[in-house]
Image: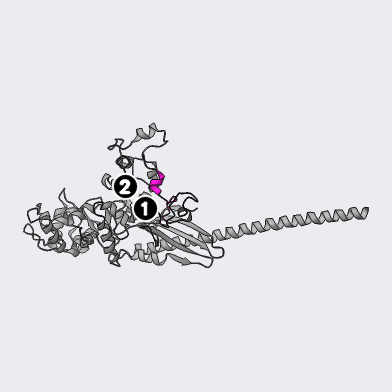
Amino acid sequence: MRRGAVVVIVIWAIAIAASIVAAVQLVCFRQATIGRETLARVQARWAARAGIEEAIAIMAWHGENPDADDPRAVVRDLELAADGDLSTGSWRIRHLRDGIERLGPLDEHSKLNVNRLGRGELLNLEDMSLDVADAVIDWRDDDDEVTGIGAESDWYRNRDSGYQPRNADFRHVSELELVAGIWPERLRGEDWNLNGRLDPNEDDGDASFPDDNADGVLDGGWAAVLTASSRSSGRTTSGEPRLDLRTAEEGDVLERLGLDDEQAKALISYAQRPDASMEALLIEDLGTLAAGQTSSSSGTAVARTRRSRAGIGRSSSSSNARPLDQVQLRTLFAEATIGQDDLEPGPGRLNLNSASAEALRVLFPDDPGIADSIVSYRDSKPEGLTSIVDLLEVDMITPQRLAALRNQVDVTGDVFTISSRGRAEATGLEVEILATVDRSTLPVRILEYREP
């Protein structure tokens, strides 16, 4: 009996020990798995961060070494660094424009800044209604007076929304969701996380949130063409502060703009007029403007347009200054301004060198073909457009039409959003980091930083 009892006890002891060993092995296996996943996540995270740091370093270098004749140089270098490898992982930086995945960071200036758009441009957005457009304007204006059929503080208070209009510029495009009449689905489309990339859950139909049509194309909603992040710095493509013609010395005008003495004097004289504007320099003769006259009697608008594009044949009887040629006109609009609007930081303009065709169509709602012509023309020039005056080479862009656009467009951008996906070499685990950076200052500033 004793031997039998001992055997039973021994068997039970072995069974218990085996169970303990199995439990310890299971716990160790799970811990090892967690450890491997944690290590892989760390490797992927730092690979993604390395991609961001590489992009920032490139932007800083171009900030110190600007090339006014090649505004797209920074973009090309960023594309070359869109893929990178480390000993334990790699990164991929991508963005979507017009439904196509492209290398490198997203130029926020490829979108229209909602803080710069008027009611007319807002109404050109797909499915935009008049009440919502007015509510957007009411949100950002500095008063509490209702615009048209918009919404001010009373509307939000009466609905216990818990917030009121900012009465200042939008700080981020997602803030539009707070505006009366705007639903997240309209703003975000399928891009629910606003990363500008087609994620698996955004291309699987109804299988997971959000709902999408699983067509392999990202519907980015209004956020695909709108931003609040782009900023105008007052700096030109040459890296110099923009020259204010109202306060500039004649020597600075001669040196920066490549004008002769008479042209410089006429330009400075015109800039002193209270009604002086850069837009008028696209349409009228410099000598005529300096004398305080107009050239409305010098032929039809079409004839004046042809003379303006050629830089010849315009009357200069009112001044000794010869007309600005096309090169001088390009330099003038690339380097100078009249007044303070272009000198102080503010909402960014649309960068013609990176603008999506969809954003350009908002500016040309009556003739979408103009947007396609601009894209084709700028893509035919490796260095891109060096001045907004280059648009005069595009069919259907007249000096009058360009003058109307001047406040909305530019040829460079300072704010980029970097979507960097790091991948661990051993496991294939991926981590995405999004950083919005401003390269207008040195060191480059990180405006927004998001990790999952």
Which mark sits nearer the N-terminus, 2 or 1? 2
Which residue corresponds to the image point at 39% horizontal and 45% vertical from the top-left? Answer: 175
Whole-percent x, y for residue 99 in the image? 38, 57
Q: Quadrant of residue 299?
A: bottom left
Marks 2 and 1 in Cβ contact (< 8 Å): no
Q: Could you tell me the amino acid type at mark 2?
A: Asn
Magenta segment includes 31: no
Magenta segment includes 190: yes
Give the camera-side residue of 233 and 121: 121
Query: Which residue occupies the extreme top position in the image?
Result: 158
Residue range (magenta): 180-199
Element assignment for label 2 = loop
Q: Is residue 86 left or right of residue 69?
A: right
Whole-percent x, y for residue 311 in the image? 14, 63
Q: Which residue is mark 2?
A: 115
- Label 2 to label 1, Cα distance in Å? 15 Å
Whole-percent x, y for residue 18 in the image? 77, 57
Give the camera-side residue of 249 and 61: 61
Give the camera-side residue of 186 and 274: 186
Whole-percent x, y for residue 210 in the image? 46, 49
Q: Could you tell me the amino acid type at mark 1?
A: Ala
Residue 224: mark in rendering: 1
Give the camera-side residue of 132 and 219: 219
Neighbours of disc 2 within 10 Å: few (<14), some (14-19), many (20+): many
Which residue corresponds to the image point at 56% horizontal and 65% vertical from the top-left? Answer: 426
Which residue corresponds to the image point at 17% horizontal and 54% vertical from the top-left? Answer: 400
Q: Is residue 443 visible?
A: no
The chief SS type of the magenta part is loop
